Amino acid sequence: MPSASQHSTSTRFGFRLLSGLIAAAAIGGLAHSTSTAQAQVTSSQALTLRADVQEANSITGVITARGNVQINYPARKIQATSVQAQYYSREQRIVLQGDVYVLQDGNSLRGETVTYLIEEGRFLALPTGGQQVESIYLVQDAPPPEGASPPGEPPFNPKPEFKTPISPP
């Protein structure tokens, strides 16, 4: 039977940042939570995980969050929502499933399943059957070169326009 420390309304799992990576520091048995799992480090390094239910398995190193999942990772400017999330501490990856939405530094990603490879800082997204993944990226246009014409005006041409020669009568 689970002890009182294994069932709580607010379970905190210890995470630490190692060379820019998240590593599970202490999971402590099988725990259930209806609140928040947050790093025990500085707030800029914390990965906050909120969900209706959370379970942690110290044998497999997997943390599972289900129902109204919200992830906030300020160190990498990541916010995400999904139906379920699983953090595989040994493989350093997070798998989000079900109506996934990820926002990072103004760019967004939507899909049915999104895997975040922590060590690589890379997302892999899969759609619902027969549909597509949607990404929206903020693209910074390069400033126009010096002397460029404003939009709607013809570009500057330093060559003079040649006129048709007039033949003498």
Image (cartoon, helix red, strand yellow):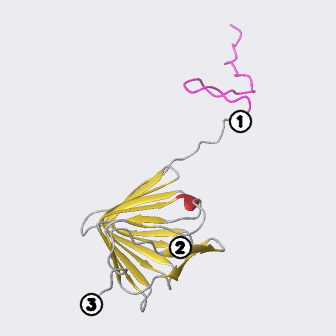
Determine if the magenta segment contains residue 71: no
The answer to whether 106 is drawn above or below residue 59 in the figure is above
Image spot of residue 162 (x, y percent): 70, 22
Q: How many marks?
A: 3
For marks 2 and 1, the one nearer the N-term is 2
Amino acid tagged 3:
Met
Residue 133 in sight in this render: no
Task: Answer few, some or many: residues within 10 Å of disc 3's Cα (few below 14, many 20 plus, some between 14 and 19).
Answer: few
- Mark 3 vs mark 2: give the one in front: 3
Q: Could you say which quadrant of the image residue 83 lies in?
A: bottom left
Q: Is 126 left, or right, of 12 in this rendering?
A: left
Circle 1 residue? 145
Which span is picked out in magenta? 145-169
Quadrant of the image containing the C terminus = top right
Q: Which mark is residue 155?
A: none
Q: Kindly identify the residue that appears in the image at 42 percent across and 66 percent down.
A: 49
Image spot of residue 24 (x, y percent): 52, 80
Image spot of residue 127 (x, y percent): 31, 67
Amino acid tagged 2:
Ile
Q: Residue furthest top?
A: 169
58 or 115, nearer to the observer: 58
For marks 3 and 2, the one nearer the N-term is 3
- Mark 1 vs mark 3: give the one in front: 3
62 or 2, nearer to the observer: 2
Q: CA distance from mark 3 to mark 2?
A: 34 Å
Image spot of residue 138 (x, y percent): 51, 47
Q: Residue furthest bottom?
A: 59
Circle 3 residue? 1
Amino acid tagged 1:
Pro
26 or 45, nearer to the observer: 26
